[in-house]
Amino acid sequence: MVENGRVTGAAVEYLRDHIAPEMGEPVEFVGPRPFPRLLEEFEEGQYDALLLISRSPERASRFVYPRDPYAMLVSGLLVPAGSLPDPVTSATQLRGLRIGYTAAMRPGFMRDPSLTYDLVNAPSATLINFRKYREGRIDAVFNPDRNALLYRLHRTKGLKPSAVVTIAGTGEGMYTVFHPKLPRRYVESYEKALDKVRRELPYQTLLQRYMNR
């Protein structure tokens, strides 16, 4: 999540305040950045790691993935309350809608070419999409993390009655990925720290604290 131009949220806190201290390493967050630019700068070696990146064969050939995912994300869609079933199970149910999204993954049938997307490629994409939705310029907002939509929905005033519906068939593992230049010992230290922290404080527990604020 981005608030006041800064990256914040449960994922950031989990790494900064729990995993990094267990590793005995400081962590500095850079951003926000548009996703394509972030990937480009990461490949150039400007960063040691990226937080919350999905896995694909193509990325696995270029980045170093740890053993386990950081979190599991389920995709969601912000829509007028009662306008769609929950969960949404096919692209057919979404045809004719103008869907706001950012340059991130679109799982499963969300990649169907019949769907109409309105791309926002900016660090504050979620906020921009919520404003466009409130103004009626788009009909829905997609996010690969439905919790990000729920969090923003509870903090946005002036919206018509709305709901966040689940995209069926999603449940993507998201990883902290490392640059190949980084010594392997950092990845192994991260894996060990993540194992310990997850036993003591599951990520979902910390995430729920944010949702209840």
Image: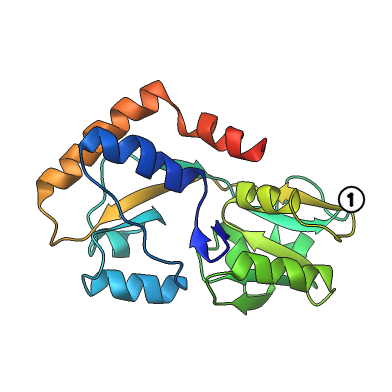
Foreground pick, 62 / 94: 62
Answer with left or right where residue 201 lies relative to residue 60. right
Q: Is residue 203 visible?
A: yes
The residue lying at 55 percent from left, 37 percent from top is 207
Quadrant including the C terminus: top right
Q: Circle 1 is placed at which residue position?
A: 82
Whether 109 is drawn above or below 123: the answer is above
Answer with left or right where residue 145 lies relative to residue 117. left
| Residue situated furthest front in the rendering | 4
Answer with left or right where residue 59 lies relative to residue 11. left
The residue lying at 42 percent from left, 66 percent from top is 31
Residue 199 location, x and y as percent? 37, 22
Residue 139 location, x and y as percent? 80, 69
Q: Is residue 112 visible?
A: no
The residue lying at 75 percent from left, 70 percent from top is 131
Residue 104 location, x and y as percent? 51, 66
Foreground pick, 13 / 205: 13
Foreground pick, 48 / 28: 28
Three-letter code, disc 1 = Gly
Colouring convention used in this rendered image of the protein: rainbow
The mark total stands at 1
